[in-house]
Image: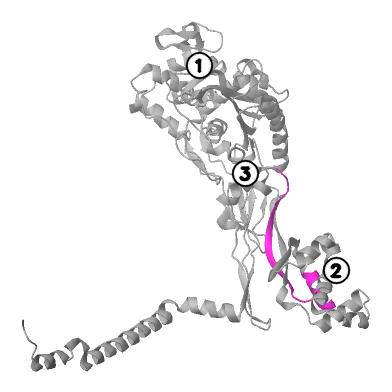
Amino acid sequence: MMMMTPNMREERKQPSYHYSVQFRAIVLCAGFVTLLTGLSVRLIHVQHTCHEEMVRLTEEEVYRKVIIPARRGDISDRDRRPLATTHPVSALVLDKYKTPSTAEIHRIASQQAHWTTADLNQLTAAKTVDIYYRMLAHRLAVPLQRDMGDLYKRLIRKNKDLIIQKDIDSEVAHRLVEELEEEGFSGLRCEDSMNRSYVSETLACHVLGFVDARLHGQSGIELGMNDFLHGTNGSRLYDLHGQVVEENAPEDGRHVVLTIDSTFQAIAEEVMDRHYQALRPEAMTAIFAEPSSGEILALVNRPGFNPADGGNADKKSQWNTAVASVYEPGSTFKIVTLGSALDQDLVRMDTVVNCHNGYYAKLDLKDASRGRPSATVRDVLAYSLNTGTYMVAQQMKPSSYYTYMGNFGLGKKTGIRLPAEAKGFIPHPNHGWGRKPKQLSRLGMGYTLNASPLQILGFMNVVCNGGDLVKHRIVRHIVSAKDQQVTAEMPREVAERVISPRTAASLKSALVHAVENGTGRRVQIPGYVVGGKSGTAGKVINGRYINNRNIVSFLGFIGDEIDVALIGIVLVDDPQNEGRRHGGSVAGPIFKEIA
């Protein structure tokens, strides 16, 4: 067993290096250096990185910033009749920390409620405040058109900033606060904002669209022209004494003048509403325009919605079928097929083509109307003969035919200032129809491609403008907020020379023939020259066409012997009427009634 010597005990008593004075000094110095470094970093961070945030927090403690809302610009029709406008409104707010002194409440009570000094002196502090709120409720009941009991219950809530009522006319609210302050009621103030209103519950709802709670556009022109309409808010800075120390004036939004004629729009909507109830379709659309300028005069979709409550409308009602939906156009597309061949001098209107007695067995191609062995190109268009259309279409080079489709405006957006516009689809010849006759036969009669109703309206635009595709537009002017001067024009614009004037005149004559003798006979209007083309396409449900479920349309124009005053399209998605569900029998009469 090993014995511990005195020297060994002495050695163990010596403190180790880790607990030496020198080590403690080093740790202490390092701690101070770390602390000072951290403080320095924090100061630099506050001074540079957080400077603006610190200034903002300080200002919030010392100043009160009030937003001065900009007025959103109006939307009006072509004659400057308002369709959507903005009104300044205010919320009446009570600051509960600014309740008057007991002496002031006594003064008000003696004047307003005829309390005696003796009765007032017997009240407790709590009862005195309660009397104040009852007097304030009594004073506010008449101008706010509210029940005094309900107002009292609201006033005794414990909120610091209590909103008494929103959406009061600003002039009324500010005048009321001034009167109450003169009477001794304190702590009341107005918080200003803007309220968007529409002249009708449904008029032009899909054109106008709607705004959210912050008055930012969410659909229609409200969204498409939001950058012009919204304006820029101003601000006012108050110090602790309520004095204005800084003010930035708001910049109001500009006004938008549409091409829409609100009277014509109302007529179109009344007709569409009646037929929508009778036909019970999935959806309906009508667009009418002035061909020479391309200006849209009326645009109606059904179902519709109330723009004032647009955010709560279902998606189906909000959907702008006229520009955002695409469909297979059916026989209205024959204008493109036959017009393209005519323009290339492959046929003339009096050219006779083989119609195979209404059934071309090789391609399983049938005519909807009574079969005939042959027909002129004019009658092929007038009677909507599928067999004859194919015999014309197969004479064209696929590449040329494809180019004409694009020139007619298919497969690309029109550029109208309405959001969510669809560009549609036209199949390239390499997709099959350039080499396969059966696919070409379906394409020629308006299947295997799709387009929006607005794009289809472009076909008639070309016919009635001597072969030029004039861009359709729905915005006419931008007007300044202050002096109501026009600051921007939306001029007439020719997008494309599509066909020659001679071809356009031939098509126009054939379309008049279609109304006088062909599939559009139900659209004749005594005293007017009417031309048009019906369209019927099978409705696809779960990937296949369903018998007697159709999307039907009528594309037409109306005018006199010299000029065309109006072009339009009516589309009905899956009508549920008894009898024939074809474009000429369903959509045609609606076009006639509106036109």
The answer to whether one can see residue 209 in this image is no
For image coordinates 64% across by 59% down, the residue present is: 72
Residue 348 visible? The answer is: yes
Query: In the picture provided, is 473 more to the left or to the right than 437?
Result: right
Does residue 151 lie above or below 424 as drawn?
Answer: below
Q: Between 512 and 362, which is closer to the camera in this rendering?
A: 362
SS at mark 2 in the image: helix
Q: Residue furthest left?
A: 1
Spot occupied by residue 256 in the image (x, y as percentages of width and height): 63, 53
Identify the mark nearer the N-term, 2 or 3: 2
Front position among marks 2 and 1: 2
* Callout 1 crowding tier (Cα within 10 Å): few <14, some 14–19, many ≥20: many
Q: Looking at the figure, which quarter contains the C terminus?
A: top right
Give the label, 2 or 3, closer to the camera.
2
Q: What percent of the width, then of the height, locates residue 330?
A: 52, 23
The part of the image, by quadrant, that contains residue 435 is top left
Kind of residue sitting beneath label 2: Arg
Q: Earlier in the sequence, mark 2 or mark 1?
A: 2
Q: Residue furthest front?
A: 1
Q: Nearer the viewer, residue 329 or 48?
A: 48
Q: CA distance from mark 3 to mark 1?
A: 39 Å
State how far apart marks 2 and 1 are (Cα): 82 Å
Asked if residue 17 is positioned above or below residue 402 in the image, the reply reads below
State the extent of the magenta-drawn residues as a range: 174-201
Task: State the residue in front, 241 or 320.
Answer: 241
Residue that label 1 marks: 377
Residue type at the position of mark 1: Val
Residue of label 2: 139
Front position among marks 3 and 1: 3
Give the structural element (helix, strand or loop) at label 3: helix
Label 2 Cα crowd, 10 Å radius (few <14 / some 14-19 / many 20+) = some
Visual colour scheme? one colour
